[in-house]
Image: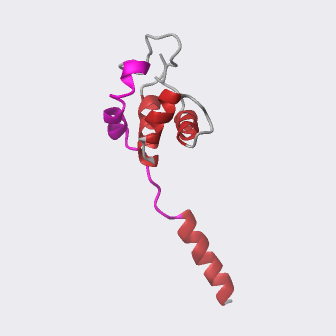
């Protein structure tokens, strides 16, 4: 009986634990650096650089973490991503998704 109760309480703590929501405003502030290559509102003026406006947050997070973890190789993006915290990445991704489609 004690084991069941312990398992139920542990599951409740995990399921009902705090959820960290991304901060779109913080992402907007952090995006000032990104604008040099990806455009003021996530629309790049340089054909080789992708547009970020409206990109799904999960995709943007995946790519930024891949640069940060050196699973993707690009000297510029690796340096930029290395300077980002996990929260910065989530905030940036939420910000660009919040801009909607082009």
Vertical position of residue 24 compared to residue 1: above or below: above
What is the quadrant of residue 94 in the picture? top left
- Is 85 magenta? The answer is no
Point out residue 68 in the picture as x, y percentages from the top left corner: 52, 41
Q: Residue at x 47, y 30 (%)?
A: 97
Instruction: Give the number of callouts.
Output: 0
Asked if 79 appears above or below 17 in the picture, the reply is above
Q: According to the image, what is the colour scheme of the structure?
A: secondary structure
- Which span is picked out in magenta? 16-39
Quadrant of residue 44 in the image? top left
Residue with the most extreme bottom position? 1
Residue with the most extreme front position: 75
- Report whether residue 93 is seen: no
Left or right of 53 on screen, residue 27: left
Q: Residue at x 49, y 64 (%)?
A: 17
Q: Nearer the viewer, residue 4 or 73?
A: 73
Image position, residue 5 (x, y; %): 63, 83
């Amino acid at each position: 009986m004690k084991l069941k109760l312990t398992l139920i309480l542990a599951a409740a703590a995990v399921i009902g634990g705090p959820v960290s929501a991304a901060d779109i405003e913080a992402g907007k502030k952090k995006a000032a650096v990104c604008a040099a290559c990806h455009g003021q509102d996530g629309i790049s003026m340089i054909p080789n650089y992708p547009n970020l406006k409206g990109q799904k947050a999960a995709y943007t997070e995946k790519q930024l973490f891949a640069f940060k973890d050196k699973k993707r190789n690009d000297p510029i993006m690796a340096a930029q991503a290395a300077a980002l915290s996990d929260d910065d990445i989530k905030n940036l991704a939420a910000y660009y998704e919040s801009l909607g489609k082009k």
